[in-house]
Image (tube, rainbow, N blue to C red):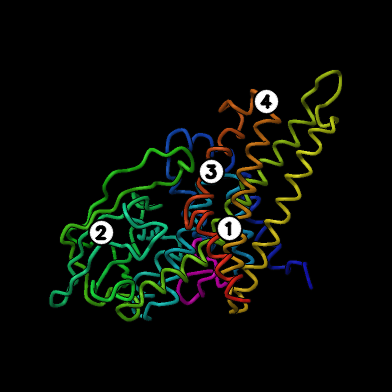
Amino acid sequence: MDFDLSEEQIMVRDMVRRFAEDKIKPNAAKWDKDHTFPKEVIRELGGMGLMGVTVPEKWGGAGMDYVTYVLVVSELSKACAGVGVITSVNNSLYCYPVMKYGSDKQREQFLKPVASGKYEGCYGLTEAGAGSDPAALRTTAVLDGDHWIVNGEKKFITNGRDARYMVFAAVTDKEKGYKGISQFVIDLENTPGFSVGYVEDKMGIRASSTTEMVFDDARVPRDAILGEPGNGFRQMLETLDSGRIGIGSQALGIAKACLEEAIEYTKERKQFGKPIAAFQANQFKLADMGTRIDASELLLLRAAWLEDKGRKFEKESAMAKMFASDTAMNAAIEGVQLLGGYGYCSEYAMERHMRDAKITQIYEGTNEIMRLVISRNLLGAR
């Protein structure tokens, strides 16, 4: 088993690390405070090929692998979790389904501009009554001549306020249940009847927008459908399997930031005449954080490697997302504890990390759902 990264992977990781340290980390607190979508930085990331990491160069991406993708998202998220999730959604939830299920015409029109970083994409699955249960979708698309008439509301859509393009799921045949769900890709600026609804005021990841997306007799071209009608449910599940690697990588970056800042603080902070890093109770906290972080990274790299090899990775991506997000939350809690009162104040980044970490246990499949996915795979394998 080879744990070495390739020269290209190391080069990309180091490039992203330097960029994140120079351009992202110094601004992360301000973006968080002001709820600022850092468009200029996202454009620069696009120029570096990082908004379409695994998309072939032919379609505007960098043509790299999923292991590199883990490295990219974790480095960005260590500096700013909001930038991390903007990048993850663009890559995993938008570019992935358009690349995998779209026609060449759709890739040219809808994938190239997003993978190259000219515009952002978003993904519309969640509704008021459909999140953990995607088969409960209520948004409908009814064929009317050369257009689909779409009605419904999507909730909690990352990048929703700022995205130009969207992949979304809707019911095209109510009689067929989940087999009557289809996915579409559209240009939001040229979709009559579409509007951005309520913009959420979130606890964390505030550099990214999270919004309601409203379809009121929206007219979507007939050829906007991805693949064949009725294949949307399967497409959604496969997309989410891939997306969980991105969210796990975001969580990994947050956890690494917590550990680095905890180590720095405990070496400097003195009590009873010595740095608090000298006390065994604090050393044990750091040891547990470091071990969980390494285990999270290995789980993520395994899932990414399996995806690169074209092998089944549903269980592995669920394990990686679940464990990495639990690790991020644990690292943030322990990080705040180690910093004491300072950890509870916005003067220090640890407070932001704690707010950012929580969502990784919730979106793109709650960790309760991850445990169901894992157990289903374990029981089915017996």
2 or 4: mark nearer the eye: 4
Hey, what amino acid is under mark 2?
Glu
Q: Nearer the viewer, residue 44 or 335?
A: 335
Q: Position of residue 34 (x, y in %)?
A: 43, 34
Q: How much space separates mark 3 and mark 2, taking CA atoms?
A: 32 Å
Q: Which residue is label 1 attached to?
A: 321
Q: Position of residue 238 (x, y in %)?
A: 47, 71
Observer-nearest residue: 277 or 107?
Answer: 277
Does dot 3 land on a helix, a strand or a loop?
helix
Residue 276 position by quadrant: top right
Sequence-first tag of 3 and 4: 4
What span is colored magenta in the figure? Answer: 51-65
In the rendered structure, find residue 358 and report the number of the disc placed on it. Answer: 3
Q: Nearer the viewer, residue 101 or 114?
A: 101
Please determine whether, in this image, residue 318 is positioned above or below residue 238. Answer: above
Residue type at mark 4: give it: Gly
Disc 3 crowd, CA 10 A, few/some/many (<14, 14-19, 20+): many
